[in-house]
Each structure stands twice: as C-alpha cells, then as structure tokens.
Amino acid sequence: MLIYLLAAAMTIAMLIATAFGLHQEAQKVRIEARRNRVNPFGRRY
C-alpha cells in the first residue's frame, strides 16, 4: 500500500513540475516576442 501512495505522490509532483516548467517556458517566449515586436517609435531597451 505504501508503494502505491509513494508512486501517486511522485506522479502528482512530476505533473506539477511539468506544468510549472511549461509556464516558465511560455513566459520566456512571451517576453522574447514582446522584445522583438516592431515599435513605431524605434527600439526600446
């Protein structure tokens, strides 16, 4: 029974870690896209 509980806990932990990683990657892509967008008043850094 303990093995099943540990396996379920690890599965949930991995799902949470995957969701967090995907969120971080999407945030990075969003920031990069915003940085590369053309500004009519020139580039701002």
Image (spheres, rainbow, N blue to C red):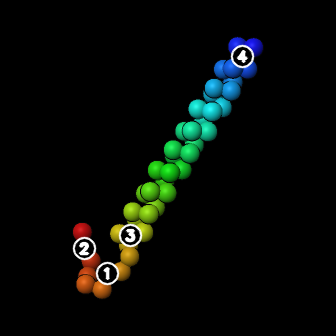
Rate crowding at label 3 as few (under 14), some (14 to 19) or many (20 or more) other CA atoms within 10 Å. few
Circles 1 and 2 in contact, beta carbons < 8 Å: yes
- Quadrant hosting residue 6: top right
Task: Find the distance from the CA under tag 2 to the CA under tag 4.
Answer: 55 Å
Callouts 2 and 4 close, C-beta under 8 Å: no
Q: What element carries label 1?
A: loop
User: In the figure, 1 relative to 32: above or below?
Assistant: above
Q: Which mark, by number, is residue 39? A: 1
Q: Tag count in the figure?
A: 4
Marker disc for residue 34: 3
Q: What residue type is labelled 4?
A: Ile
Give the Cα distance between marks 4 and 1: 56 Å
| Residue 41 % position (x, y) | 25, 84
Q: Earlier in the sequence, mark 2 or mark 4?
A: 4
**Looking at the rendered structure, which numbered label has been put on residue 19?**
none
Mark number for residue 3? 4
Among numbered discs 1 and 3, the one appearing first in the sequence: 3
Please identify the quadrant where the C terminus is shown.
bottom left
Question: Residue 2: horizontal and vertical position, in percent?
Answer: 70, 13
Is 41 placed above or below 3 here?
below
Element type where label 3 sits in the image: helix
Observer-side mark, 2 or 4, equals 4
SS of the residue under disc 4? helix
